[in-house]
Image (cartoon, rainbow, N blue to C red):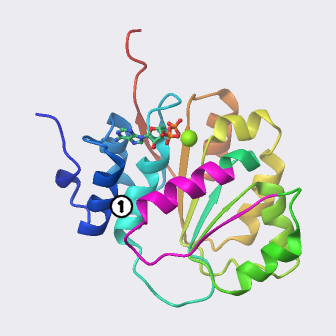
């Protein structure tokens, strides 16, 4: 029998948001990644483009993110491009429609002082490109000490674009005790090397391409 969103034991607020979106069933990557992300273990999820990877990590994260008024963000999502920052922020806002949550997207090429002011107001989730994230952290505008989960989305594209060094710099300024969550459309040699070099035995959740 096909898994439903109810089977995932989501909150009523999340279920209502998903119903508004018209989604009837979780996709395979959403179904299989859910309990692993919730477990707190490091995870690398592989599934092709368009299979709903954003919700695959955001549903379990939002399921457990309790509302507080604390200032410093607890979740950091890194994506390779500014277009993706905007897209991911929009997806999060849809899913979080019925919960109180502060989410901010930051990327290069936009006014950094505007971003600094928004950060000062207090945020729960930051979605960022690596370069701008690092600049904001170095300038002390963004305090990383409360980050509990690091998501690296499109990690294959990230490495293809030459962001490995930037990622390593960011790992250095994050709390060591954190969950690492990586999602990718493909398992490339570079992705494999990053995992081997920097992550503790992540759980692998891989959805085969259908029809091959
Ligand atoms: P990916 O990151 O794997 O490329 P996205 O997370 O961008 O995929 O999702 C692709 C599209 O599918 C988005 O428009 C998203 O809102 C939609 N989507 C996500 N989950 C579901 C679902 N369970 N059922 C139907 N559509 C979904
Ligand atoms: Mg995606």
Disc 1 beta carbon < 8 A from ligand 1? no
Image x and y of residue 49, in percent: 53, 30
Do we see residue 41 in this rendering? Answer: no
Do we see residue 100 in this rendering? Answer: yes
* Side of 91 relative to 18 (left or right): right
Q: The C terminus lies in which quarter of the figure? A: top left
Q: Is residue 6 magenta?
A: no
- Residue at horizontal 82 percent and vertical 53 percent from the top: 166
The stretch in magenta equals 85-107
Q: Ligand 2 appears in which quadrant? A: top right
* Side of 180 relative to 194 (left or right): left
- Residue at horizontal 72 percent and vertical 41 percent from the top: 158
Image x and y of residue 18, in percent: 32, 53
Image x and y of residue 175, in percent: 64, 74
Q: Is residue 12 above or below residue 18?
A: below
Nearer to us in this view, 154 or 41: 154
Nearer to us in this view, 82 or 168: 82
Q: Is residue 70 above or below residue 202?
A: below
Image x and y of residue 50, in percent: 49, 31
Q: Is residue 10 above or below residue 119?
A: above
Q: The N terminus lies in which quarter of the figure? A: top left
Q: Is residue 153 above or below residue 143?
A: above
Mark 1 lies on residue: 38
Question: How many callouts does the rendering have?
Answer: 1
- In which image quadrant can residue 171 be found? bottom right
Q: Could you say whether the residue bearing mark 1 is in a helix, strand or loop?
A: helix
Nearer to us in this view, 90 or 164: 90
């Amino acid at each position: 029998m096909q898994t439903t969103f109810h089977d995932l034991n989501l909150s009523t607020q999340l279920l209502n948001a998903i119903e508004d979106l018209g989604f009837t069933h979780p996709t395979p990557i959403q179904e299989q990644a859910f309990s692993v992300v919730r477990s707190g273990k490091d995870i690398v999820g592989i599934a092709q483009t368009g299979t709903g990877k954003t919700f695959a990590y955001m549903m379990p994260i939002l399921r457990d993110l309790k509302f507080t008024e604390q200032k410093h963000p607890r979740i950091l999502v890194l994506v390779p491009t500014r277009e993706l920052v905007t897209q991911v922020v929009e997806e999060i806002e849809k899913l979080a429609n019925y919960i109180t949550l502060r989410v901010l997207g930051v990327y290069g090429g936009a006014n950094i002082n505007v971003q600094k002011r928004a950060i000062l107001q207090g945020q729960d989730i930051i979605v960022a490109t690596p370069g701008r994230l690092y600049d904001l952290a170095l300038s002390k505008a963004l305090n990383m000490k409360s980050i509990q989960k690091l998501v690296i989305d499109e990690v294959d594209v990230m490495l293809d674009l030459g962001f490995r060094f930037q990622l390593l710099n960011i790992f250095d300024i994050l709390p060591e005790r954190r969950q690492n969550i990586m999602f990718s459309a493909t398992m490339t040699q570079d992705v494999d090397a990053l995992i081997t070099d920097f992550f503790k035995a992540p759980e692998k959740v891989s959805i085969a391409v259908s029809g091959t």
